[in-house]
Amino acid sequence: MSKLAAQDKFLDLSDYGRSFGRFFATQLKNTCFTPIHVTLLFGLSGLIAIYCILNDHYFLAGCFILLKSGIDAADGELARLKKTPSYSGRYLDSVFDIILNFMFLMTICYVSKTTIWLTLLAFICIQLQGTLYNYYYVILRTKSVGGDTTSKIFEYKTPNALPGESQQSVNILFGIYTVVYGTFDKIIHALDKEAYKVKTFPNWFMTLLSIYGLGFQLLLIAVMLPLGWIEYIVPFFIVFSLFIFIFIAIRKKTLT
């Protein structure tokens, strides 16, 4: 099952790991590996990247960050191949992402001259960027006929467990998800409350917006590290957040 109907598909600059993820998932289709196992694996790849940063192996760190993005795409692909979508997997994936994002930035702060306060601001900025992308993307997926509906536009209520997963796991992971993402969701919703009323988003708009997708954010970090630009990573993502207001302005003025 595709996330989007054919007419709604766009060039997602943050989804460069999809081909690898699909290939990897295909190899695991007839094995005992589950999407949760794959999620744990991309977490391990992220931790190895952090170890590499701590030891000044920036090229290897970049490689493992990109590998993390590829494996990250595989858990959802495997769930679709095995026809076992789950809220547990969806929330665990998101929780791992935000934890790794925080750890990446804190590690960069530790090995560079960047201050902790700027690093925390950059973390907030990165999460707001990703939240804006996910907000519009989920709206598009929800309105796309035949698209994936595991994610919801407004996630204020614990969903009912899908076949094959326990309600207790969904409750726990949803609770953690709302704690770590709730504030960012509320901020973006407040900035563009009427976005969910839009019938669809044009492909060009979603392609531009995809520079805020997690995959593209990690790609930027993976490139900047071996180039010796580690001191610029934190300030870059702070300035990069200015586009949030530009994207929202475009949506409000031209996409109604």
Image (cartoon, rainbow, N blue to C red):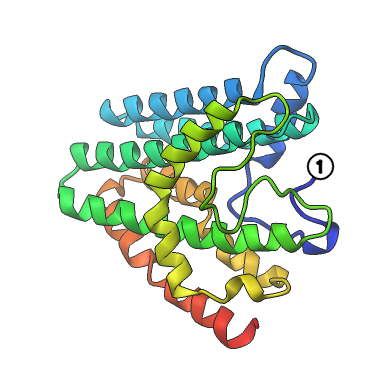
Q: Going 56% across and 58% down the picture, which residue do you hit?
A: 154
Q: Amino acid at mark 1?
A: Met
Question: Viewer-proximal residue, 185 or 250?
Answer: 185
The percent coordinates of residue 199 (x first, y second) are 73, 74
The percent coordinates of residue 78 (x first, y second) are 72, 29
Q: Which residue is mark 1?
A: 1
Tell me if I can see residue 216 in this picture. yes
Tell me where residue 7 sits by quadrant: bottom right
Q: Is residue 133 above or below residue 59?
A: below
Tell me where residue 47 sits by quadrant: top left
Q: Is residue 173 above or below residue 131?
A: above
Tell me where residue 71 sits by quadrant: top right
Q: Quadrant of the N terminus?
A: top right
In the displayed structure image, the side of residue 203 where residue 171 appears, left or right:
left
Q: Going 71% across and 49% down the picture, which residue do you hit?
A: 149
In the displayed structure image, the side of residue 132 where residue 77 appears, left or right:
right
In the displayed structure image, the side of residue 13 where residue 223 appears, left or right:
left
Q: Residues within 10 Å of mark 1 (few under 14, many from 20)?
A: few
Residue placed furthest toward the bottom: 253
The percent coordinates of residue 112 (x first, y second) are 19, 42
The percent coordinates of residue 163 (x first, y second) are 73, 28
In the displayed structure image, the side of residue 50 where residue 40 appears, left or right:
right
Tell me if I can see residue 66 in this picture. no
Total count of labels: 1
Question: Viewer-proximal residue, 66 or 182?
Answer: 182
Could you say whether the residue bearing mark 1 is in a helix, strand or loop? loop
